[in-house]
Image (spheres, grey):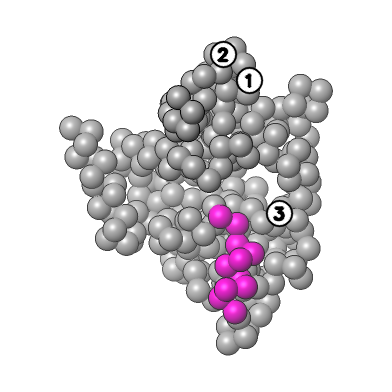
Amino acid sequence: MAGTPLVYETRITNDARDIRASQRLRYRVFVEELGGSGPLVDHDNRLEADELDPLYDHLLLIDPHKDPADLDRVVGAYRLLRSDRAAEIGRFYCDAEYDLTPLRASGRRLLELGRSCVHPDHRGGAAMLMLWNALADYVLEHEIDILFGVASFHGTDIDALRAPLAWLHHHHLAPEALRPRARGDHFQRMDLVPEAALDRRVAMEQMPNLIKAYLRLGGFVGEGAYVDHPFNTTDVLLLMDTQAMSEKHREFYTRRAEGRG
């Protein structure tokens, strides 16, 4: 029936065929749309891959109307790595960009989120909500305490990003005991505008929707941005302490736990 909302499927997987479909979506978003690149990007087959993909869990949002053999069936994705699994592997993806010592030293259960993307034809509707609902189930199942991962601004022109970066620094900096710091030569200060000179409306207009969503959930950022020229992005590290979430969002997770029976 015309106008009937699309009902998506979600699943957690590390199946090679599913990962390949996720890599096709990532190519569509990160390479074709945002102009990124990387050593394992396969332009001939339109796949955005890296060496860690087989080691992660992949949360996928699937269009059930597409053929199961169609790589374009995946329309939303997250890449997930728990701290117990990272200890076996020896690293998180974010270790390349940020010093995660404070998070590891906390002794709490961590979940790294990465490669978050939704196909442009499926944005603005139920897709992101369904991904977050599935993520909430995963967080509950594995008793995660802290979620973290890099989120990106498009482009590497820091002058153009002064307002949103400064807003994050002045208003959403993580507590020092949990605060990762951007590494080395890629470190970019974010306190580029004095707090008194900031215009919240301007800063939020330039803030990517994903970052705004994390902030609404009570998210914080690490110290400094990381300028990633190959991916044509300026990254910030976001983290959420599930114990420090607002009451509203703790109730959301609790309701889901109760509904799971």
Secondary structure state at the residue bearing disc 2: loop
User: Which quadrant, please, contains the N terminus?
Assistant: top left
Q: Residue at x 30, y 40 (%)?
A: 140
Question: At which x and y percent is residue 93?
Answer: 59, 42
| Residue ID for mark 3 | 154
Check residue 204 for magenta coloring. Answer: yes
Residue 26 sits in which quadrant? top right
Left or right of residue 74, residue 139 in this image = left
Question: At which x and y percent is residue 72?
Answer: 63, 23
| Residue ID for mark 1 | 71
Q: Is residue 82 visible?
A: no
Q: Amino acid at mark 2?
A: Asp
- Residue 67's label in the rendered image is 2
- The crowd level at tag 3 (other Cα within 10 Å; few <14, some 14-19, many 20+) is some
Q: Amino acid at mark 3?
A: His
Q: Residue at x 54, y 62 (%)?
A: 222
**C-alpha separation, residue under disc 1 versus residue under disc 2:** 9 Å
**C-alpha separation, residue under disc 3 versus residue under disc 2:** 32 Å
Sequence-wise first label, 3 or 2: 2
Question: At which x and y percent is residue 238?
Answer: 52, 56
Secondary structure state at the residue bearing disc 3: strand
Secondary structure state at the residue bearing disc 1: helix
Question: At which x and y percent is residue 69?
Answer: 59, 12
Q: Nearer the viewer, mark 1 or mark 2?
A: 2
Q: Are marks 1 and 2 in contact (CB under 8 Å)?
A: no
Task: Provide the residue span drawn in magenta.
Answer: 199-209
Left or right of residue 136, residue 94 in this image = right
Q: Amino acid at mark 1?
A: Leu
Q: Is residue 12 above or below residue 129?
A: above
